[in-house]
Amino acid sequence: MSAKLCCNSAVPYKPIATDYERYFKLFLFNTAPSIPIEEHIIQLARQENFGKLLDVKFFNWNGSTYEQIEETDVIKHEFTKINSFKNFVCKKCNLFFEINLYLKNGAPRASHHWRYNINRLNEIDSIQ
């Protein structure tokens, strides 16, 4: 897997495909994006498998590389955690990882949320 986790033994835990796979692949594998990727933040939480939380780190994509930042920078620059994540487990190291994606406020959200646009409430909920 990725050296950003613990070792090469970490594997996806209950993997699901999201609309944002390119962000996770960029973070985990340092793959060059085929299309430009907007500024975003990755949150990497590391914990003992079925145990205590060990640490949480934040990484900002600046267009060419990731740099580690503080949690206060996430709030200061108005990033929002979206419902898109990946989980990994490493039985060799007895660790569990959760990777979350943050986008700028107002950025598009996952398309599997049918009510992601509040302006469409009347259109969706109107009784015909």
Image (cartoon, rainbow, N blue to C red):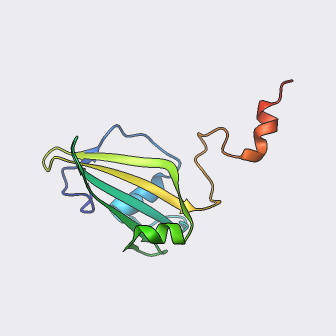
Residue found farthest to the top: 128
Q: Position of residue 20 (x, y in %)?
A: 50, 52
Residue at (24%, 45%) from the top-left corner?
A: 89
Above or below 91: residue 31? below
Q: Horizontally, is 101 left or right of 90 in the view?
A: right
Q: Horizontally, is 17 left or right of 113 in the view?
A: left
Q: Quadrant of residue 77?
A: bottom right
Residue found farthest to the right: 128
Residue at (42%, 40%) from the top-left corner?
A: 16
Q: Horizontally, is 95 left or right of 123 in the view?
A: left
Residue at (34%, 58%) from the top-left corner?
A: 44
Q: Quadrant of the C terminus?
A: top right
Above or below 91: residue 4? below
Above or below 2: residue 68? below
Residue found farthest to the left: 92
Q: Quadrant of the N terminus?
A: bottom left
Q: Horizontally, is 120 left or right of 67 in the view?
A: right
Residue at (46%, 64%) from the top-left corner?
A: 41
Q: Position of residue 100 (x, y in %)?
A: 42, 54
Q: Position of residue 108 (x, y in %)?
A: 63, 55
Q: Position of residue 110 (x, y in %)?
A: 58, 47
